[in-house]
Amino acid sequence: MKKLPYEIKLTYIIVIIVMILFLIFIVFIILIYNRKQLLYIKEKQLKDSEYENQLLQKELEKQKSLENERLRISHDMHDEIGAGISAIKLQSEILKLQINNDKINTIEIDELIRISNDMNNSMREMLWSLNGTNDSFPDFSDYCRNYVENYFSKTNIQLTFSSVSENKDAIVKTELRRNLLLIIKEASHNIIKHSSASEVSISIFQQSNLLKLEIKDNGSGFEKTDSKGYGLTTMQSRTENMGGDFSIISDSSGTKINVSISL
């Protein structure tokens, strides 16, 4: 049998080596591709897991917020309605004694009516604060306007109320609405009871992501050492608990309260 020339043998060997190298290269490419695919799948699974964790975290925060709101409502109902019912019970017992003695006092009847009205107003405010359809800035400012106009109508104090909004669709959330209304109520009570003012102005502004409240009167003012009985600590605490800024200036020319809170 005739032997193959050396050159041909070398050529075969080179071809075989090249084919082996090519196969190794193909296998290497396949392994790298598979590795990248596995890494991609793992990264995708990790991203999906992170996204699911974020959704779960948001859901937990939402549930926590709802639970806190339920607790707040139960506390409010316990405080407002419980105290009101106790007061009505007491007034009813007083009236019962007066009926038995044939000495009905109209003052006690008027007090019973007042307590009932206060309870009714408290319930209306709770329902208003919980109603999501009242979240818009116009609805919030209209409610505040109606409240203060009714409140000061029973006095000789001249009220000026104004509201300005850059965005009529701005949302004022439940907790913010409730706390701002309570601040307005406390400040209005202080003005009537302590200030000897003849004029008061209440302004609500919505600018960018801020909600600003300004309450001014032309009363006699007060010293800082005399401010404990004015509920100022409570108003400041309500503001700061919502991440806002609270300031007050009071002198012989009157008192000015400023509240600024992010929406």
Image: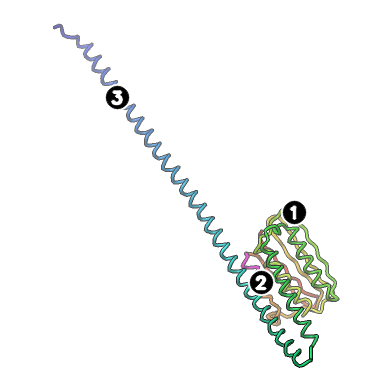
Q: Residue 126 sits in which quadrant?
A: bottom right
Please name the residue that numbered disc 3 is placed on.
21
**Residue 206, image x, y percentages:** 73, 58
Q: Residue 229 sits in which quadrant?
A: bottom right
Q: Residue at x 54, y 59 (%)?
A: 61
- Mark toward the start of the polypeptide (1 vs 2): 1
Type of residue at label 3? Leu
Please name the residue that numbered disc 1 is placed on.
168
Please say whether residue 221 is one of the residues in the magenta stretch: no
Given residues 197 and 42, the one toward you in this image is 42
Type of residue at label 2? Gln
Please say whether residue 239 is one of the residues in the magenta stretch: yes
Q: Residue at x 72, y 53 (%)?
A: 169
Q: Is residue 231 left or right of residue 75?
A: right
**Residue 194, image x, y percentages:** 77, 80
Q: Is the residue under label 3 in contact with that under label 2 (CB below 8 Å)? A: no
Q: Residue 189 sits in which quadrant?
A: bottom right
Compared to residue 21, the image places residue 189 above or below, namely below
**Image coloring type:** rainbow
Highlighted magenta segment, given as a residue range:
235-242
Compared to residue 93, the image places residue 176 above or below, namely above
Please name the residue that numbered disc 2 is placed on.
236
